[in-house]
Image: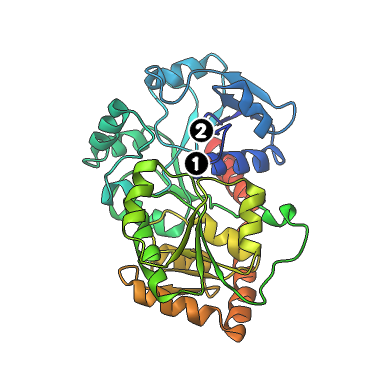
Amino acid sequence: MKLFFDARYIRTDFHDGISRYSTELATALGRQAHVTFIICDTDQLKLLPPEADYVLIHRPTSAREPLTALILNHYQPDVVFSPMQTMGAFGRRFKLILTLHDMIYYRHRTPPHQFNGLIRAGWWLYHATYIPQRLALNSADLVATVSQTSREDILTARLTKRPVVIVPNAPQKLRQYLKTDVTTKEPKNLVYIGSFMEYKNVETLIRGMQYLPEFTLHLLSRISPIRKAQLEKIRPHGAKVVFHNGVSDQQYAEALADNSLFVSASLDEGYGLPVAEAQALGVPAVISDLPIFHEVAGEGALYFDPSSPADFAKKVKLATQSSEYQTLSHAGILQSQKFSWDESAATLLKAIESLLQ
């Protein structure tokens, strides 16, 4: 079997969700099968298995992307897996698996701010109707997604006639960055990592800090000056909110391990990987009452109404009570063990083998 994995979405500066998913799944899959990686930057090889086979082609944002299958035909793959759904399939002579992580951008159509104006306009048009997505997904032989919640969304919207397989996200091993155990004597820090797009609803977290004067909210991710200024305007007087503007994996692990809870007031998620990463360390989560969060976090979290800063604060206070904290911590560790990259890779490999048969 000649298996190709599209690794062009791996970022070499810092991971976003797709980059993390690509890197971890590629590495795990490489332990179970011989894989040739499709890259667009040789620096991506540093994040892939050592001495991996690879082919170098254009970036996924290139104007040549619709012709990607014609380019890959020259290498005669049996099957190509892409962790996204935008690979050009025209003229392909191989089996193709595309991935749709979630349907968030049909419910929240504001494009990511880091893209240029032309790409943002194309993004919005792409998500204005289901038609482009249906054409893309039906051009594949199989569609992958990351959760049962997303699979149900895809089937409900009738986005594809192809089979849909769940290849879940899984927490990275943050414990490897810690020199000491997680500290839980007196939870006082609230940790958020993720984007600052509007549907992430960070506003509720910040407004809720007016009821939590003894806590500090740590916003770890990179943030634009414009977005930071917007959030600073709504910060309650005296509320302790720290904008870290990006952290390393080690700093991320250390922040979670320092008397912390993980928090999120997101209005929509495809999976919610940071929740699972916190739980794997034994750090409880206080998160929005969303179906996907229940799927990921189970009994290792407390859930609140994301429209209510007061309810958020109430659940934080409850989670920091000693007995409740220990119960949530234990349940979260058990829940996080349901997800692993090796198991996700095995699921994908089984689907690939079935497809080829």
Asked if the residue at tag 2 contacts the one at tag 1, i.e. Cβ–Cβ closer than 8 Å, the answer is: yes
Q: Amino acid at mark 1?
A: Ile
223 relative to 119, above or below: below
Q: Amino acid at mark 2?
A: Tyr
Q: Quadrant of the N terminus?
A: top right
Q: Residue at x 61, y 68 (%)?
A: 283
Give coordinates of residue 105: x percent, y percent.
31, 46
Q: Considering the numbered disc 1 on the image, is that residue within a helix, a strand or a loop?
A: helix
Q: Residue at x 30, y 33 (%)?
A: 120
Q: Nearer the viewer, residue 170 or 314?
A: 314
The residue tagged 1 is 18
Q: Quadrant of the C terminus?
A: top right
Give coordinates of residue 135: x percent, y percent.
30, 34
Q: Nearer the viewer, residue 5 or 105?
A: 105
| Side of 300 where 121 appears, left or right | left
Q: Residues within 10 Å of mark 2 (few under 14, many from 20)?
A: many
Q: Considering the numbered disc 2 on the image, is that residue within a helix, a strand or a loop?
A: loop
Q: Nearer the viewer, residue 189 or 10?
A: 189
Q: How many marks?
A: 2
Residue 56 seen in render: yes
* Residue positioned most to the front: 238
Q: Residues within 10 Å of mark 1 (few under 14, many from 20)?
A: some
Q: Nearer the viewer, residue 213 or 72?
A: 213
The residue tagged 2 is 9
Residue 337 seen in render: no
Location of residue 224 by image quarter: top left
328 relative to 293, above or below: below
Give coordinates of residue 9: x percent, y percent.
51, 33
